[in-house]
Each structure stands twice: as structure tokens, then as C-alpha cells.
Image (cartoon, helix red, strand yellow):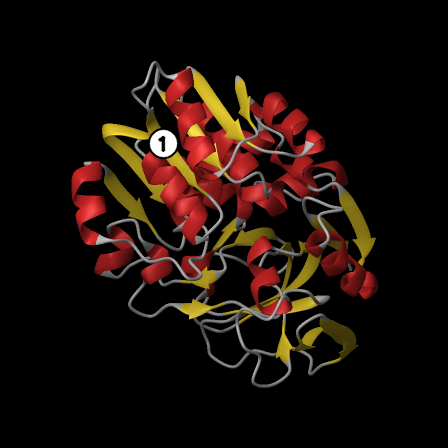
């Protein structure tokens, strides 16, 4: 089969790769219904993460089970399934505490920008839908595999509760779905920090009540101005840079909550500043598997349409253009159809 491979910064190719096969009795093979390009894929694409050798790309997936290992019991061929970017057994003490992305036996699920995918630890990783969904549901269901699950974790880790004022730093797909998640959790006021008109429009559609275009210290000052000098109850940091993290902490009221789900690059926190900021800080790789059943249910019942973050759809063989469009901010998120 052919799939996406990153050779060097800016160099994604769609070329021959080995067909996935059952390696362990706990594996499953799925035929992809859709995949996509993630914002975190742009870090190696832009050269921030060194690429030592050609690397298969992609970690968001949904599709039909084709084959399972002899020990797999929870899913079977013919079912439509969705899974997380980290495979987990969903039974170890860490998983039972709700942090499946740090499972004691976790394996990263890569190489999803291809027609077929091997998923390890299938019983603990994959969640089947009640039936095969209609084509129009696929984008929103795909989003639960990572970007919606990560936005949801951002809101939960920031302790979003009904009536709160929430600020979201970052207007990529995760930030936008952080807005949607905060709205679902009952936030009364949601401040989206964005400079891009199309993203501002979608943020408002997802539940944002205010838009802040300023960044850095000016952005912090604007949040304080909107909250009578106090700051937001909860701030979702959805970028992963030094500026975005400082902006998030500075925008939070004393005793408030900051979540961080953007993969950190160059982020350093000064101990004394953090000490006197007096905020709760929590984040990390989203334990998407914990949220999958709830998010799938929200999508299937028509409560949310997170698939709206996909504003560019391409055939899988045009994956390189999907990367370029996101890198150049011509697209929020690229959906790829095998």
C-alpha cells in the first residue's frame, strides 16, 4: 500500500509502505474510513522535531475492522471503530485512574495517513459504534480520535464548571474544540484568543462569547480588562509555546486553573513566577480513550458537530498539500479520504 512518509522538514511523500499485519495476538487491522493531519504533525514538518530517518505519519483514525488477533474479544471484523493515538490496555492502574495515554503498556499508534492501519492492544484502545455510521458523520467521529478528545481534556483539566469564565489560548482545531468542550461543560463566558476571521467565526459558532485578538502581555491585559481586573477562572493553553504558556498563566485569576495540551516546545517556567501566580496547572497527552464513549455518544446524538474544524478535504494521495495548507494557515485542519 501507499502512505504518507516524512523525509525531512517540508518533505512529505505518498509512497509505498509495507502492508500492516497482525504482529501480536492483541492487534487489530482496520481499513481507514478517514484520517487527517494533526497540528502536532506540523512540529516535525517544520523541523522543530528532528527527523533521523523517513517516518510514517498520522495518528488519527477511524474505520472498519478487517482482522483481529486471536486474543481480541471486544471488537470484530465488520465493526466501525475509533481509537486513540496511544494504544492502552485500559486495565493497568494508570488506565483505571483515567490516564490511558500513560498506560504502563502504552504504544504510540503511528502511520495512520494510509489506507490500512495496525492498532496494538485493540481491546483497550478501540471503541466500536453501534453500527456503521453514515458518511456525513465520519468527520465528527474522526475528530474524537484526537482533536476533540484533546480539546475535551483541556477543558476538564482546567476544571471547567457551569457558570465559569473560560479563556482559550490558541485558535487551531484543538483550541476551537476546547471552546466547544467548555460550552458543553456549562461555561457562561468563553473568551477565544484569535486573530483569524474564519477561526473567530467558528469559535463563536462553538460557543465563544468574546474574541481577543491581542497576544502576549497585551492579550493578558485584555483578558484582565474583560474580567474586571481579576482574570479568567480557567484558561486552556492549546499551542505549546513559551508565549502561549505565559499568556495562559498570566490570564488566570488567583486560585484559577490552567490546562496545557499543546505539545511544549521551548517552554520553561520560572519557579518563583509560578509560585506567586497561585494557579492550578495540569495537562499532558490527552487520555482520549477515557472520553471516547461520551464523545462518540455526543456526536451520534447530534449534540455537537466537531467535524466542522475540517475546512479542507483532500484525497489521501494529496497529503502533502494538506500539510502545506495547514502550515501556511490556509486550512484549520485537513481531512484525508483514502
Residue 155: % across, % down: 39, 35
- Residue at the (69%, 83%) spot, across then down: 18
- Residue at the (33%, 24%) spot, across then down: 231
Residue 97: % across, % down: 24, 50
Left or right: 203 with respect to 13? left
Residue 142: % across, % down: 62, 47
- Residue at the (34%, 13%) spot, across then down: 228
Residue at the far bottom in the pictured view? 53
Quadrant in which the N terminus is drawn: bottom right
Quadrant hosting residue 202: top right
Residue 187 in view here: no
Residue placed most toward the observer, 321 or 103:
321
Residue placed most toward the observer, 150 or 25:
150
Quadrant hosting residue 56: bottom right
- Residue at the (44%, 38%) spot, across then down: 152
- Classify 128 as above or below 105: above
- Classify 277 as above or below 315: above
- Classify 46 as above or below 303: below
- Classify 57 as above or below 160: below
Quadrant in which the C terminus is drawn: bottom right
Q: How many marks?
A: 1
The residue identified by callout 1 is: 251
- Element type at marker 1? loop
Mark 1 closeness class: few <14, some 14–19, many ≥20 residues within 10 Å: many
Residue 188 in view here: yes
Left or right: 1 with respect to 286? right
Residue 315: % across, % down: 83, 57
Amino acid at each position: 500500500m501507499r502512505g504518507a512518509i516524512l523525509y525531512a522538514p517540508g518533505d512529505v511523500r505518498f509512497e509505498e509502505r509495507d502492508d500492516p499485519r497482525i504482529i501480536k495476538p492483541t492487534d487489530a487491522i482496520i481499513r481507514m474510513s478517514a484520517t487527517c493531519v494533526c497540528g502536532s504533525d506540523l512540529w516535525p514538518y517544520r523541523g522543530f522535531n528532528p527527523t533521523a530517518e523517513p517516518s510514517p505519519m498520522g495518528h488519527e483514525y477511524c474505520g472498519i475492522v478487517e482482522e483481529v488477533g486471536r486474543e481480541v474479544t471486544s471488537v470484530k471484523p465488520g465493526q466501525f471503530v475509533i481509537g486513540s493515538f496511544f494504544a492502552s490496555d485500559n486495565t493497568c492502574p494508570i488506565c483505571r485512574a483515567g490516564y490511558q495515554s500513560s498506560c504502563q503498556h502504552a504504544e504510540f499508534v503511528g502511520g495512520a495517513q494510509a489506507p490500512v492501519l495496525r492498532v496494538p492492544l485493540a481491546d483497550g484502545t478501540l471503541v466500536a459504534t453501534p453500527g456503521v455510521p453514515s458518511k456525513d458523520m465520519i468527520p465528527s467521529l474522526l475528530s474524537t480520535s484526537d482533536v476533540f478528545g484533546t480539546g475535551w481534556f483541556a477543558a476538564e483539566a482546567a476544571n471547567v464548571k457551569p457558570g465559569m469564565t473560560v479563556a482559550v489560548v490558541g485558535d487551531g482545531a484543538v483550541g476551537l474544540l476546547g471552546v466547544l468542550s467548555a460550552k458543553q461543560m456549562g461555561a457562561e463566558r468563553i473568551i477565544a484568543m484569535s486573530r483569524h476571521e474564519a477561526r473567530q467565526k467558528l469559535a463563536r459558532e462553538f460557543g465563544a462569547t468574546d474574541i481577543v485578538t491581542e497576544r502576549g502581555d497585551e492579550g493578558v491585559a485584555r483578558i484582565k480588562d474583560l474580567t474586571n481586573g481579576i482574570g479568567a477562572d480557567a484558561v486552556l493553553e492549546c499551542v505549546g509555546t513559551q508565549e502561549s504558556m505565559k499568556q495562559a498563566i498570566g490570564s488566570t485569576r488567583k486560585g484559577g486553573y490552567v490546562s496545557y495540551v499543546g505539545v511544549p516546545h521551548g517552554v520553561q517556567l520560572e519557579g518563583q513566577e509560578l509560585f506567586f501566580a497561585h494557579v492550578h496547572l495540569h495537562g499532558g497527552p490527552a487520555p482520549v480513550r477515557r472520553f471516547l464513549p461520551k464523545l462518540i455518544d455526543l456526536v451520534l446524538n447530534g449534540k455537537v458537530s466537531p467535524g466542522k474544524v475540517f475546512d479542507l478535504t483532500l484525497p489521501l494521495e494529496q497529503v502533502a498539500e494538506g500539510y502545506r495548507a495547514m502550515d501556511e494557515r490556509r486550512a484549520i485542519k485537513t481531512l484525508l479520504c483514502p
